[in-house]
Amino acid sequence: MNNIKLDMEKAFSFVSRDEVFAWKETMEKNNVALHEKTGKGNDFLGWVNLPTAITEEHLSDVEETAARLRSKKLDIFVVIGIGGSYLGAKAVVDALSDSFAHLKGSDAPHILFAGQNIGEDYLYELRELLKGKEYAMAVISKSGTTTEPALAFRLLRQDIEEKYGVEEARQRIVAITDESKGALRTLANTEGYKTYVIPDDVGGRYSVLTPVGLVPIAVAGFDVRALVQGARDMEKASDVNVPFEENLAAQYAAARNSLYKSGKKIEILVNFTPKLHYFSEWWKQLYGESEGKEGKGIYPASVDFTSDLHSMGQYIQEGERILFETVISIANPDNEVRIPEDKDNLDKLNYLAGKRVDEVNKMAELGTALAHMDGGVPNIRVEVPKIDEYNIGQLIYFFEIACGMSGYALEVNPFDQPGVEAYKKNMFALLEKPGFEEETKKIKSRL
Ligand SMILES: O=P(O)(O)OC[C@H]1O[C@H](O)[C@H](O)[C@@H](O)[C@@H]1O
């Protein structure tokens, strides 16, 4: 079953339906290349069949670990990771959580993140907070050598060992990393942490349905089975035997490539609910790292509406005409809030009395789409019935498989990220990391 609807009508006045559907053959071929592992980067395609490959035993194991950790009555579960080892869990947990869970208190631990930045104050303040809390942590790194999470883990590991003793600390740390390579694997084996493997053939930005995402999401109290089921159903709905006319992910990939060719260089992922803010951050890594290379690629941006209509709205309406929007529209909020009558009506809102807040939001959405279209910004709409585990699972796989097909249409390898190394090399040279002596000399001569 596919719960997602794709509406491209408001893009078709910029690129015709025929132009978009002219990608049929290419996208079908690209989808076959992904499934049969015959295209570029084909050693990183483990995510394509991942949802259906996830076993019952694996899900039970993840759930048992989550239950074991939660039996420690945790206030906080710290997830240490960056990029693909951070954004998927953050996106799903934020989408599914009560916006004020951290202030309301609940049975589930609050999920906090570390190692996703090198902010000294962030780390200081987190460590201060943890002193007075019950906590456990997951340390997540596919390579096991990324500087940011390694640094955060070095600090937080010392803290947790000091607070609980080495033995109990071991029971409170889960390591998610490569099966055999990397410093984190060596440490986890030595310490005897509970570990999970990030499969070799699943890159970081495609790893949310591996333990990288599943463990934190389960600890946060969400239903990983429903999440995986949503992804499974979208895997089926985007399979190679599904023709382009019915394969919405292929159509989305085609539409964005048509728009790109017509000069729309920036895609803005739009939401109308703050719960999806980090879903956009996840999506930006997925598309940015997959497509932005060889001097090519749509620049993935994001806005939260209506908030950003009062800031970025001006540029989108009237700035340089290189933008298109993809709106994730949630058909039904979970809760109902009706606008009350007010006897003085000083705010002149009585015309809305009795209506749901979501009705106003939906008219803002429609009004914005029409205004932006009139202003030269094509609009693609992805409609989802509601935000829950199942639908988020569908959305995740929808954007992943579309990204693979779209990247192949650009003729890049969507599964590497060589450009990310440049800053790392400079940082190591500047920090005088052993082994970087030559680079240190060179970089210092530029300063
Ligand atoms: O999981 P890790 O190996 O620590 O990698 C974390 C992240 O950092 C890298 O530099 C890459 O750009 C990302 O694709 C990756 O997700």
Image: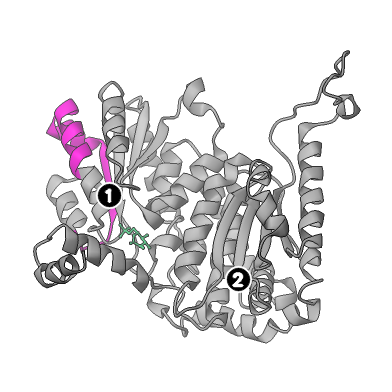
Residue displayed at 80% across by 71% down: 12
- Magenta segment, which residues? 154-182
One can see residue 230 in this view? no
| Whether residue 382 is situated above or below residue 272 in the rendered picture | below
**Image location of residue 354, percent across then percent down:** 87, 26
**Image location of residue 135, percent across then percent down:** 30, 30
Q: Residues within 10 Å of mark 1 (few under 14, many from 20)?
A: many
Residue displayed at 63% across by 75% down: 260
**Mark 1 belongs to which amino acid?**
Pro
Examine the structure image and report whether residue 175 is included in the region drawn in magenta.
Answer: yes
On residue 265, which mark appears? 2
Return the disc, 2 or 1, that comes first in the chain's sequence.
Answer: 1
Q: CA distance from mark 2 to mark 1?
A: 33 Å
Of helix, strand and loop, which one carries label 2? loop
Question: Residue 80 is drawn in which quadrant?
Answer: top left
**Image location of residue 181, percent across then percent down:** 21, 64
One can see residue 198 in this view? yes
Residue displayed at 19% across by 39% down: 155
Examine the structure image and report whether residue 239 is included in the region drawn in magenta.
Answer: no
Q: Which residue is mark 1?
A: 149
**Image location of residue 388, percent across then percent down:** 61, 43
- Which residue is nearer to you in this view: 385 or 314? 314
Question: Residue 378 is drawn in which quadrant?
Answer: bottom right
Q: Residue extending furthest top?
A: 343
| Whether residue 272 is situated above or below residue 180 in the rendered picture | above
Question: Residue 154 is drawn in which quadrant?
Answer: top left
On residue 417, which mark appears? none
Query: For the residue with label 1, is its CB less than 8 Å from the closest atom of ligand 1?
Result: yes
